[in-house]
Image (cartoon, helix red, strand yellow):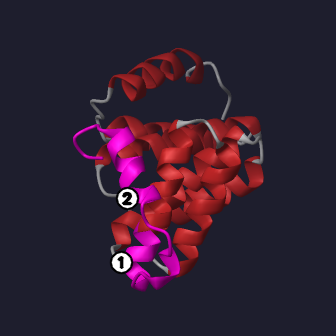
């Protein structure tokens, strides 16, 4: 999966017939990877099901738990369940995320959620936190530039 061979990764995951026989931490990672593959295929219901199973089992690494919670938050945004999305993303920020790119994405998502709720002061605060991390991912950088034009005109 790290080398980008998603078909090969899916083939390996599908070769596991009895995931319940795996040790608990490995089973958790198994379901998380299944969820990631389902997300790539835009199958949000299967992705959510697998990610929840992985989270319920407990993550072997705390950073991975934060990243999984962030993905669950992004899934909830896709489903337009904004209240649940905010809950997941806040939990992800509390648990800790593996790098500044993920943190910036979480803060930007929280910024947009706060703007939807019309809590402009909180939205500006999350925007400042995202910008302070100086992310380098092109998508995040472009989101920050777009928001920067708009957020200065927002009251609060």
Q: From the viewer's perspective, is residue 136 above or below residue 73?
A: above
Is disc 1 surrounded by few (<14), some (14 to 19) or many (20+) residues within 10 Å? few
Within the magenta stretch, is there residue 121?
no
Q: Verify CB contact (< 8 Å) between mark 1 and mark 2.
A: no
Can I make out residue 49 in this image? yes
Location of residue 27 in the rendering, given as x and y in whole percent from the top left corner? 44, 75
In front here: 84 or 13? 13
The residue tagged 2 is 97
**Quadrant housing the C terminus:** top right
**In the drawing, what numbered circle is on residue 2?**
none
Pointer 2: residues within 10 angstroms few (<14), some, or many (20+)?
Answer: many
Residue drawn at x 37%, y 40% as measured from the top left? 6
Mark 1 vs mark 2, foreground winner is 1
Label 1 to label 2, Cα distance in Å? 14 Å
Left or right: where does residue 52 sit relative to residue 137?
right
Q: What is the span of residues highlighted in magenta in the rendered image?
A: 1-29
Instruction: Identify the residue at image location x=64%, y=55%.
Output: 48
Residue 119 x %, y %: 71, 42
- Asked whether, in this view, residue 104 is left or right of residue 72, the answer is left
Helix, strand or loop for disc 2? loop
Give SS at disc 1: loop
> 61 or 145, which is in the foreground?
61
8 in magenta: yes
**Coordinates of residue 92 in the picture (x, y in percent):** 50, 61
Tell me where residue 97 sits by quadrant: bottom left
Q: What x and y, as percent, mark residue 2?
A: 25, 46
Mark identifier at residue 60: 1
For the stretch drawn in magenta, the main secondary structure is helix
């Amino acid at each position: 999966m790290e080398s980008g061979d998603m078909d090969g990764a899916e083939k390996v995951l599908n070769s596991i017939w009895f995931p319940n026989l795996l040790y608990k931490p490995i089973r958790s990672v198994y379901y998380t990877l299944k969820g990631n593959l389902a997300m790539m295929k835009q199958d949000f219901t299967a992705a959510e099901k697998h990610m929840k199973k992985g989270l319920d089992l407990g993550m072997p690494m705390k950073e991975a738990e934060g990243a999984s919670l962030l993905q669950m938050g992004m899934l909830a945004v896709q489903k337009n369940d904004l209240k649940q999305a905010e809950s997941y993303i806040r939990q992800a920020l509390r648990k800790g995320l593996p790098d500044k790119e993920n943190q910036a994405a979480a803060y930007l998502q929280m910024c947009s959620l706060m703007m939807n709720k019309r809590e402009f002061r909180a939205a500006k605060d999350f925007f400042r936190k995202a910008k302070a991390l100086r992310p380098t991912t092109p998508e995040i950088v472009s989101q920050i530039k777009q928001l920067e034009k708009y957020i200065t005109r927002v009251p609060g």
